[in-house]
Amino acid sequence: MAEWVENIPSRRAVVMGMARTGCAAAAALARRGAEVVGTDMKEIPGLREELPQGVALELGCHREETFRRCDLLVVSPGIPATDRFIQTALAAGAEVISEIELAWRLCPAPIAAVTGTNGKTTATTMLGAILEEAGYRAPVGGNIGRPLVNVVENEGQEADFVVSEVSSFQLEWAPTLRPRVGVITNVTPDHLDRHPDLDGYAEVKARLLANQGPGDAKVLNADDPLTARYLPGGRQAALAFSRKKAPETGAYAEGGWIYLCLGGSRERVCAAGELAVPGVHNLENFLAACAAAGFLGAGADAMARLARRFRGLPHRMEPVAEIGGVRWVNDSKGTNVGATVMSLESVDGPVLLIAGGTDKGSDLTPMLDPLRKRARTMVLIGKAADRFDRFFRGKVPVERAATLEEAVRRCAEAARPGDTVLFSPACASFDQFRDYVHRGEVFREAVRALDKEAAR
């Protein structure tokens, strides 16, 4: 990539979509001497002040001529490949990449990258934290919230590894990305409005591994058929993680213990019960992080220390309160059916589930068995409520609520000591909220209001 980076000053670059990653990409290219245009369909007040000199802005529309004359296009992950302006740039001979691909090309340190439908943010955070526990400098960025270009520019020179969460949308335009370690946590139905089918979605995830070679490693979930099928083949090392069986190389759980298998030897990491965050999904995330960190040189002692102190992330099976013996858990990041199923399976005792939002049209069948086993009721909200109601009514107890706050009140009236109220929507948030973070904050506030009432 050295020659490509040296030629940046000769590039006519367009950055399409001027949210955080777009701003980071535009600034990085401009600082290296490229002619840069940042374009967005929205007017964004104050954007000019956030960017260095050398970035021209076209806001409120995209101009076809701008895309015809560029030779490099950096695309926001929210924009599908079928967009006519992307097609215009491609037809004119432009190279199209994502911000993740740009960061990789600029990065002086090896990259450890994590993708998957569910758990990738937690697994990414755990991986970075284990490496730091082991004494490495391992800054974290990417789809996790901090643009990877910013991480590379600010901390890449001093880093031993750069750890990145990567989404399928970012992988669509990452033709040369070659992580030292590539992790796929799982593949379950999601974003099928963007990808042709589940197999096509899995193939995009697997692009993370496409450029790896000797000296690299792939870390894959042996318990997930869509992910495990990528274990054979390839020139890189293959590591598996499993909570059901012992792989030849990787990490697994057995008999209440977590083990690491590398170099033909088995090492005990810690008891599974020492993992500070509950749930089978967090066990899987930790196993994935252990396998990846072990390949990069971290020892089992660092993994064990992280297991005991890692308290989880906001909006991911986050304990909010215990009121009158009832636990309230915020899993607003449960934006698809697979995530909600894992969350249901991670709760002990009866559950009152709050679900619904913007419907992704996924098959709801996987939710039936855990709901029949655990749910005393489910309270439905949002645009998805009609379809969810038709599917679940008569199979599990169902109620409807107009708002999330009303759903919280209904659960408070119905819950008994020992129950868990789980907010895991299995849907996107955009019908009633800005994003899953806003949605989780509203849930938290509604529960805290209940707590205050109970304390009076």
Image (cartoon, grey):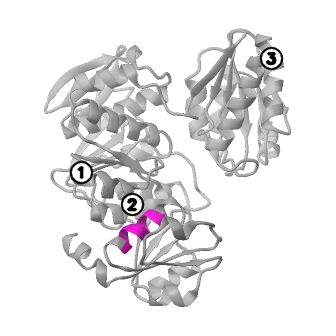
Q: Secondary structure at mark 1?
A: loop
Read off the magenta span. 22-30
Please name the residue that numbered disc 2 is placed on.
100
In the picture, measured across the screen, residue 260 lies left or right of residue 41, that is left
Please name the residue that numbered disc 1 is placed on.
180
The span from disc 1 to disc 3 (Cα, nearest Å) is 52 Å
Residue 435, placed above or below residue 46: above
Q: What amino acid does circle 3 point to? A: Glu
Please state which of the two labelled residues, at mark 2 or mark 1, is closer to the viewer: 2
Q: Nearer the viewer, residue 384 or 446?
A: 446
Q: Nearer the viewer, residue 10 or 355?
A: 10
Q: What amino acid does circle 2 point to? A: Ile
The residue that appears at 41% across and 64% down in the rendered structure is: 99
Please state which of the two labelled residues, at mark 1 or mark 3, is closer to the viewer: 3
Residue 165, placed above or below residue 400: below
Q: Say whether marks 2 and 1 touch (CB < 8 Å).
A: no
Quadrant assignment, res 344: top right
The span from disc 2 to disc 3 (Cα, nearest Å) is 47 Å
Q: Secondary structure at mark 2?
A: helix
Relative image position of residue 339 (x, y in whole percent): 57, 37
Label 1 vs 3, first from the N-terminus? 1
Q: Secondary structure at mark 3?
A: helix
In the picture, measured across the screen, residue 84 lies left or right of residue 54, that is right
Q: Which is the main secondary structure of the residues drawn in magenta?
A: helix
Query: Which numbered dot is residue 152?
Result: none
